[in-house]
């Protein structure tokens, strides 16, 4: 993604969650690539600013343990995510 905007960061830091990344940016630690949904509230409030919106969807995966697919609530959640993803 960053190649599209000719950006080559000197340092890349990885966090364990998008929420942790967002908090780091809010504390002025750096820039981040985050999904719309995770930053929507802060963008609306003006505490975060969108610098660029990439036109393509990033490859995204819904993952779960192989044996969990047999539970009906997991199957229902998978169907919900698939339906929602089609509208994004």
Image (cartoon, grey):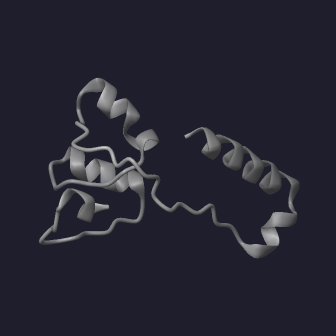
The residue depicted at 79 percent of the width and 67 percent of the height is 68
For the C terminus, the image quarter is top right
Percent x, y of residue 21: 32, 55
**Residue occupying image coordinates x 69% and y 49%:** 82
Depicted 81 relative to depicted 16: above or below = above
The single residue placed furthest to the left in the displayed view is 10
Q: Nearer the viewer, residue 7 or 64?
A: 7
- Report the number of discs: 0
The residue sitting at 24% across, 37% down in the picture is 48
Percent position (x, y) of residue 34? 36, 51
Corner quadrant of residue 44: top left
Q: Position of residue 8 (x, y in %)?
A: 16, 68
86 vs 11, left or right, is right
In the picture, the quarter occupied by the N terminus is bottom left
Residue at 39% over, 51% down: 19
- Toward the viewer: 3 or 11? 3
Residue lying furthest top: 45
User: Where residue 56 sits: x, y (%)?
Assistant: 43, 52
43 vs 80: above or below: above
Side of 87 relative to 74 (left or right) = left
Dividing the picture into quarters, in which one does residue 16 lie? bottom left
Residue 1 in the figure: left or right of residue 17: left
């Amino acid at each position: 993604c960053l190649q599209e905007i000719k950006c080559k960061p000197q340092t890349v830091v990885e966090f364990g969650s998008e929420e942790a990344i967002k908090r780091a940016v809010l504390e002025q630690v750096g820039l981040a690539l985050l999904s719309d949904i995770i930053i929507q509230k802060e963008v609306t409030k003006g505490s975060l600013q969108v610098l660029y919106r990439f036109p393509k969807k990033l490859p995204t995966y819904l993952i779960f343990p192989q044996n969990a697919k047999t539970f009906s609530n997991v199957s229902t959640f998978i169907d919900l995510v698939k339906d929602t993803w089609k509208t994004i």
